[in-house]
Image: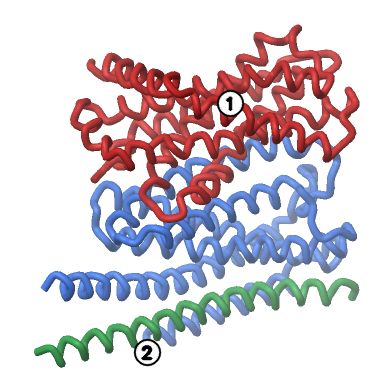
Chain colours: A green, B red, C blue
Amino acid sequence: MKNLDSVFAAYMAAWAIFFVYYVTIARRAAALRQDIERLKNSVTRGK
Amino acid sequence: MSLLPNAAVLLGKELRTEFRSRELLTTTVVFILIVLVLFSFTFTPTSDESRRFGPGLLWLAFLFAASLMLQPCFLREQQNDTLSALRLSVSDPFAIFLAKLAANTLFLLLTELLLLPFFALMYNVPVVPVLHWIIMVLFLGSLGISIVGTALSAISAQARMRELLLPLLMLPLLTPVLAASMEVTKGLFDRAPFVQWKGVGFLAVFDLVFLTALWLFGEYLLEE
Amino acid sequence: MGKNIVAAVCVFVLLGAAAYASFFIAPTDAKQGLIYRILFLHVASAWTGLTAFFICFVANLLYVWRRQPRWDWLGVSGGEVGLAFTTVVLVTGPIWAHPVWGIWWTWDARLTSTFVLWLLYASYLLLRTLIEEPDRRALLSALFGIFAFLDVPLVFGSIRWWRTQHPQPVVMGGPGSGLDPTMYKVLFFSWFAMLALMTLLLRQRYRLEAMRGEFETAQQEMETA
């Protein structure tokens, strides 16, 4: 079947984009959770 | 309704400020001249080629010039801390926008009209037979550019990197104006000139939509 | 946590079903053969992107009206997720065009409009990074977001009217080419699956923004204390 590789490439590219985007959200959330921990620690230390 | 008299007073102030120094007008005119010369390097400016590429390049030059010219619009108020005074002086904040966009449209139109003879000479395009129609499309296009540009200038004045931000925000928003104005101008520069009324109507709709949006949301743009 | 996994699995199942339908249920196209099946991915992504931008628009309006932070959170989520889907449209477009026309990019009406759409919302997100104060950022980006969405029909209209005068390759086939009824069904099912994915991504992004909002408030309270 001609062009099967193009169709495949399209689907792979699309899923890659969604996956990468999902991963960036997860990464940012993890970094934020670290910052929150740091903030909490500085509050408890201050008390 | 005190909106129009207030706007008129503020418009007078804007015009007086500019005509005292004329720095905005002169720098904008020189800028567009430079752009027109640079454009001549990009293609062979024979009469036919100029009729094809001329309108697009002309409007592109106007768009770039506007994105620079509109920077000081609200920035000036911020730097001199006159924005709160302005807001207190009028009951309807839309008057401030009306005055500024009227002034900006006027300045843009003035620069464009000053440059039109240069463009006609440099690119061998006959402008005089269709002059009144050209003024009409220049007005409608400049009005659209001013409405959007004035609103976005209020936003960019409150952000970082504002010199780069204003063009970044303005240019994508104004692609419909570029497309429509260019087409109407192309029709007017044609060997058998005609008015593309679809384009004129579209520009009028664009101007109306964004003027209404500015009227509805303008006061929030000026919030402290 | 459990609910998240169930939701994600449901979305994957739906997407898998849509892909299956695109390959095996939709009939063959006489002119383009196999390659046209990208349509189900390309067009469904485009519609989903616009849906996300519409959600962003409504959230922007609600923020300007109500000033509640959660509308700002929903707005940026809609903008970002919409941009992701629009990126997929811009990537699958050339992958479709190249085997059919031999060129990677065609300035056809839909691709050009989609590119401008992408730039509009990239600017929206960029604007947000350039304003530090959270309330100011929320208000100004909401206002720009409203202007941007109002511009969308004007962009598509003007490009369709005036950028398609010259004969040029059209990615999705000219106005004459209609779709088989089965193709329509598969397309709508693909769109439905994409909307499920959009909802999943929106929820994750919203949660991130909500967490960030509360962090910033806590930070501010600490500084003033």
Mark 2 neighbour density, 10 Å: few (under 14) some (14–19) many (20 or more)? few
Q: Which quadrant would residue C37 be assigned to in this image?
A: bottom right
In this image, C184 relative to B110: left or right? right
Quadrant location of the C terminus of chain A in the rendered image: bottom left
* Residue nearest the viewer, comparing B136 with B12: B12
Q: Considering only vertical position in the picture, is C101 above or below B70?
A: below
Q: Which chain does tag 1 point to? A: B
> What label sits on residue A33 in the rendered view?
none
Q: Is residue C86 left or right of residue B143?
A: right
How far apart are the two marked residues, 1 and 2, measured between alpha carbons?
56 Å
Snapshot quadrant of residue B78: top left
Picture coordinates of residue A29 (x, y %)?
Answer: 39, 81
Q: Are marks 1 and 2 in contact (CB under 8 Å)?
A: no
Q: Is residue C152 visible?
A: no
Instruction: State the SS at label 1.
Output: helix
Residue B150 seen in the current view: yes
Residue for badge 2: C2
Q: Position of residue C155 (x, y in %)?
A: 60, 41
Task: Read off the residue under disc 1.
Answer: B141
